[in-house]
Image (tube, helix red, strand yellow):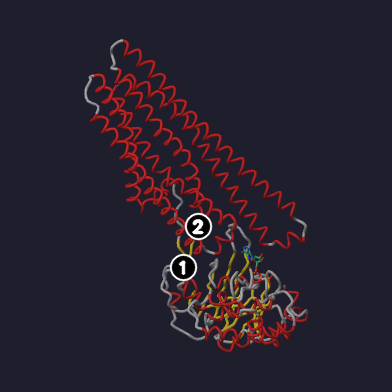
């Protein structure tokens, strides 16, 4: 190990996951950057509501003026101004809150998108993409209604309710006592209902996520599903998930309806009780008629904040369930990509690779895949990795790219432990062509420049020539700007491989990793690919997981792997003479290795 590697301190490239937080606290974290606007919107809504609450008091003035034969102009004018200002202020408040709600959702979506892109490969291995999509779309949409309505409605509803209740207490203690008893009953019912709504929403959203995951599974292998006649079976699984989502949705609807009805019913009871009790007290001369009317009006106006509060509290449960699901993604382990992109060695030439007694398992409870892998690949030339299926060849590449970290031992690039490389610098030094050479939806040009957005036309032409893609470009109707279909379905397997190589080369890698396709390529494609690889090996270091005899015979050195260990290293001629496994693999054209 080099000095740099030995003296390197803390591991780069890994961000410890956020600790999961209580959904309400997390919701507040999302809302906090917008707290000014939320406060303004909430204040305006509150003012609007307060104007409504003041109406019974002004109505009392009107009644008193009538009773005392005084002029009605002032109280009526006051009532009109109150109505108009209340409506205007409420509308403005609703707009400010709605806008802020959208902004909060945008913040959450942006944060989630950045986090998703930075997730560690190991964390994504355990996730279902369809479920992730539903968390980003359906769950964040749920969050919007919570922030736009519930959060502020809970606050304004509570404030108005408290304000109204205080006014009632001031007006008449006995009638206030009757109202409070009814409100306590509402509170108790809500205490029972809300957790049920929360549980049903979590289960319902999980079922929607499951549907997304199943759809992604289905359309990811649509031809296989058709060819296997598996439509019915897949359809049944989707149907089950859809039905679960429906069942949970119905449960939420039932509990919400119950809570709304109880709240309405309770206010009606309070209304009747106050009317009865108040009537008796007016008859006994203990209460003025105007006070009773004002009290009843107050109760009537309190229905709105109470209904608001009940609805907001039930909606809040859905939102908090969504926050919980969003938080599950937000707290997954991420890569740190903000580190300085400079290479720790400052070298620009072809890179060296070394594995020093590397052991590795994909998960703490999974079996060991590498049992002390040790080999070195000097700067430049072609190094082939061969061995039976499952020997751990592709894993060598995953460890070099730092998709995962070695369990023990060290993986070194240019003599520096990959854990001590800033991730952007490490990945900029390496070009990786996966076995299935993924091509993304879009044009050929978009597929090439995704790895190097600043690439010039000359650089693109150069890699097109190196990857022997000129013929394809000439054949496509719009050349480089032709769409090549979802997953590159409109081009051949060999062409996909060469597009992937061209993309990797455009990054000017100091090390090119290539996982050879295991499927048979026609002779022309195979020769073209081999030539591309040899051309690249003249400029940079190339490591290839080889499944073809023609590749290994051209390699400068071959690393033979078996069951997570390096069995032998040498040239084709040396290994044919000394290694039995290699001889067998070579005899079977290495194709049995796939
Ligand atoms: N993401 C993963 N999670 C868990 N186990 C994995 C993962 N990827 C590979 N494995 C396991 O690790 C072992 C080595 O896999 P690897 O892909 O490195 O083998 P390989 O030599 O490249 O095989 P092949 O020639 O078939 O591609 C296999 O047993 C495989 O099942």
Q: For residue 500, what is the image quadrant?
A: bottom right
Is residue 474 found left or right of 60 in the rendered image? Answer: right
Q: Residue sitting at 26 percent across and 19 percent down? A: 67
- Distance, label 1 to label 2, CA atoms, is 14 Å
Q: Residue at x 30, y 17 (%)?
A: 289
Answer with the quarter of the image where residue 230 lies.
Answer: bottom right
Q: Position of residue 33 (x, y in %)?
A: 36, 54
Q: Nearer the viewer, mark 1 or mark 2?
A: 2
Q: Is residue 248 above or below residue 536?
A: above
Residue behind label 2 places its C-beta within 8 angstroms of ligand 1: no
Residue 461 percent across, percent down from the top left: 56, 85
Say if 397 sits above or below 220 in the image.
below
Q: Which mark sits nearer the N-terminus, 1 or 2?
A: 1
User: What is the crowding at mark 2: few (fewer than 14 residues within 10 Å), some, or many (at least 20)?
Assistant: many
Q: Residues within 10 Å of mark 1 (few under 14, many from 20)?
A: many
Determine the residue positioned at 39% across, 34% down: 305
Pick the residue in front: 302 or 538: 302
In this rendering, position of residue 212 left or right of residue 50: right
Q: Quadrant of residue 562?
A: bottom right
Quadrant of the frame with the C terminus: bottom right
Foreground residue among 150 and 300: 300
User: Mark 1–mark 2 contact, CB under 8 Å?
Assistant: no
Q: Is residue 368 left or right of residue 455?
A: right
Between 12 and 69, the residue placed more toward the observer is 69
Q: Which mark is residue 332?
A: 2
Residue 207 horizontal/vertical position (percent): 60, 47
Residue that mark 1 sits on: 13
Whether label 1 lies within 8 Å of ligand 1 gets the answer no
Instruction: Return the x and y of residue 328 as percentages of the image width and height.
Output: 51, 52
């Amino acid at each position: 190990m080099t000095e740099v590697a030995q003296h390197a301190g803390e591991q780069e490239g890994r961000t410890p996951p956020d600790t999961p937080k209580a959904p309400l606290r997390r919701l507040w974290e999302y809302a906090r950057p917008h707290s000014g606007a939320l406060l303004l919107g909430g204040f305006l809504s509150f003012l609007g509501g307060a104007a409504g609450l003041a109406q019974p008091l002004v109505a009392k003035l009107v009644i008193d003026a009538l009773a005392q034969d005084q002029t009605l102009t002032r109280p009526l004018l006051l009532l009109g101004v109150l109505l108009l200002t209340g409506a205007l202020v409420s509308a403005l408040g609703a707009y400010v809150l709605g806008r802020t709600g959208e902004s909060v959702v945008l913040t959450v979506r942006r944060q989630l998108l950045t986090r998703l892109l930075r997730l560690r490969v190991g964390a994504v291995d355990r996730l279902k993409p369809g479920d992730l999509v539903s968390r980003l779309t359906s769950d964040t949409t749920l969050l919007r209604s919570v922030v736009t309505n519930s959060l502020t409605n809970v606050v304004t509803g509570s404030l108005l309710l408290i304000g109204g209740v205080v006014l009632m207490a001031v007006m008449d203690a006995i009638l206030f006592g009757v109202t409070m008893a009814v409100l306590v009953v509402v509170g108790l019912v809500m205490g029972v209902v809300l957790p049920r709504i929360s549980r049903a929403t979590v289960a319902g959203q999980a079922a929607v996520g499951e549907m997304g995951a199943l759809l992604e599974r289905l359309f990811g292998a649509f031809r296989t599903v058709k060819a296997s006649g598996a439509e019915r079976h897949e359809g049944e699984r989707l149907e089950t998930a859809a039905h679960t989502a429906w069942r949970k949705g119905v449960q939420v609807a039932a509990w919400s309806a119950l809570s709304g009805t109880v709240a309405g019913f309770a206010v009606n009871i309070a209304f009747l009780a106050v009317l009865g009790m108040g009537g008796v007290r007016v008859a006994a001369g203990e209460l003025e008629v105007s006070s009773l009317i004002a009290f009843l009006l107050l109760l009537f106006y309190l229905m709105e904040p109470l209904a608001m509060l009940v609805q907001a509290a039930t909606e809040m449960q859905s939102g908090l369930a969504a926050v919980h699901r969003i938080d599950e993604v937000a707290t997954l382990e991420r890569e740190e990509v903000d580190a300085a992109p400079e290479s720790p060695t400052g070298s620009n030439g072809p890179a060296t690779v070394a594995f020093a007694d590397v052991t590795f398992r994909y998960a703490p409870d999974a079996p060991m895949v590498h049992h002390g892998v040790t080999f070195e690949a000097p700067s430049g030339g072609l190094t082939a990795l061969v061995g039976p299926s499952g020997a751990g060849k592709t894993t060598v590449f995953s460890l070099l790219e730092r998709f995962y970290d070695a369990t023990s031992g060290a993986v070194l690039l240019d003599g520096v432990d990959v854990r001590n490389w800033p991730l952007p610098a490490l990945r900029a030094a390496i070009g990786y062509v996966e076995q299935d050479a993924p091509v993304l939806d879009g044009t050929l040009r978009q597929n090439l420049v995704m790895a190097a957005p600043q690439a010039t036309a000359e650089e693109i032409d150069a890699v097109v020539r190196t990857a022997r893609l000129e013929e394809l470009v000439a054949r496509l109707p719009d050349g480089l700007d032709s769409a090549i279909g979802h997953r590159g379905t409109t081009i051949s397997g060999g062409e996909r491989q060469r597009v992937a190589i061209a993309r990797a080369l455009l990054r000017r890698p100091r090390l090119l990793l290539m996982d050879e396709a295991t499927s048979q390529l026609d002779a022309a494609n195979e020769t073209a690919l081999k030539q591309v690889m040899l051309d690249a090996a003249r400029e940079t270091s190339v490591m290839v997981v080889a499944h073809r005899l023609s590749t290994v015979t051209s390699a400068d050195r071959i690393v033979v792997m078996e069951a997570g260990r390096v069995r032998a290293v040498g040239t084709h001629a040396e290994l044919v003479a000394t290694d039995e496994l290699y001889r067998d693999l070579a005899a079977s054209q290495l194709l049995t290795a796939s």
